[in-house]
Image: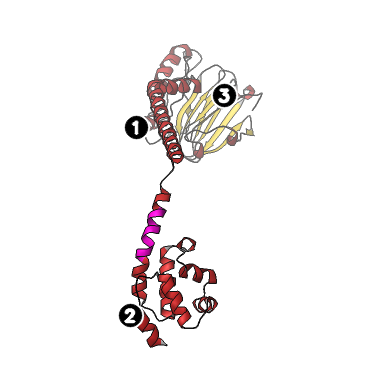
Amino acid sequence: MSEEGSAENSNGPTTRLVGEQLRTAREHHGMDRQDVADQLHLRPSIIQAIEESYYEAMPADLFLKGYVRTYARLTEQDGDDLIARLDRELEPYRESQEAQKEPSPTEVIRQKKIRRRRIGGMTIAVVAVLLLGWVVYEYGPWVVDSAVEAAGEVEFEVPDPGSGAGAEADSEPEPEPATATDEDDTTGAGSSEAGADTEPAFSTPVAQVDDSGGAASNGGTQTATGEQPGGSQPSLTITFDGACWVEVVNGNGERVVVTLAQEGETVEYEGPVPFEVLLGNVDAVASVRFMGEAVELEQYPVNAGRTQFVLDTANG
């Protein structure tokens, strides 16, 4: 039977379609379509489509060629020859498929509309970006200046504890406390000296702190006292466990404490309220007590390690 199939393949006509030759070989081997489908693990409808050259019902060319090659091997046919002839048979089918892929006039119009929408959207986006850039360029500085002005008219500039200004304030000796007789003569000079280290925020005279323990010695206590006797005045006590710039303005508008406190020092003051307190390094503050009561610093906003708050008998 094998010799007869080979003879038919070599001597038989080659003008027949591939499907017809496979059907003839199948019948020559005494098999029906179900037998071939079972051995090739395919559906009988696929075997029928191959034999009838109904390629539209078949999957892609790659699968079709694999089916034909396996079918040829089962029926003892020349698989390479059948595949070459199959390519020639599929050429008109491929051309028709390509023709069907060409878009219709309606589809062409739809695609043009989509492209125009995309171009329009991109144009609008570019114009919007350019307009936004122009607005920022023209009005950006003005917006920033307005925001700074709105943040507050008074700004305390706290020098870095390691900077030269802070070091000079620490090394220079504190002036002697002004007496009641020459207070009017010395307050103006005190204001000028305090302004050399920090930016003044008030135009009223400034009274410097009397450093009784010495600014250079750790564990010292700096005390400033108002005009009236200390016993009847509200008191403020601040202790430090690190270097911290501290300023205190009393209720008369006098900046009574201006110093760079060191670790272990304590600043004490008694005088008229309210007290406006500026701390340049919150992390270096061990405790703050107002009229003997502890003040929780967490309730006040902190900006770059600096905080500023007001203590009064109404809220202290």
Q: Position of residue 27 (x, y in %)?
A: 48, 80
Residue 70 seen in the current view? no
Which residue is at a point 33% across and 69% down the rendered structure image?
Answer: 84
**Residue at mark 2 to residue at mark 1: CA–CA distance:** 110 Å
Q: Position of residue 87 (x, y in %)?
A: 35, 65
Q: Relative to 154, is 280 above or below?
A: below
Residue closest to the eye, 196 or 2: 2
**Residue at mark 3 to residue at mark 2: CA–CA distance:** 119 Å
Q: Quadrant of residue 259?
A: top left
Say how the picture is coloured: secondary structure
* Highlighted range, magenta: 87-97
Which residue is at a point 36% across and 72% down the rendered structure image?
Answer: 82
- Name the residue tied to disc 1: 164
- Name the residue tied to disc 2: 11
Type of amino acid at the residue the image marks with label 3: Phe
**Label 3 Cα crowd, 10 Å radius (few <14 / some 14-19 / many 20+):** many
Type of amino acid at the residue the image marks with label 2: Asn
Q: Secondary structure at mark 2?
A: helix
Q: Quadrant of residue 78?
A: bottom left
Q: Relative to 146, is 268 above or below?
A: below
**Residue at mark 1 to residue at mark 3: CA–CA distance:** 28 Å
Residue closest to the eye, 38 or 175: 38
- Name the residue tied to disc 3: 275
Q: Secondary structure at mark 3?
A: strand
Type of amino acid at the residue the image marks with label 1: Gly
Is tag 1's residue or tag 3's residue first in the polypeptide sequence?
1
**Label 1 Cα crowd, 10 Å radius (few <14 / some 14-19 / many 20+):** few
Residue 35 seen in the current view? yes
Residue closest to the eye, 110 or 295: 110
Q: Position of residue 262 (x, y in %)?
A: 45, 37
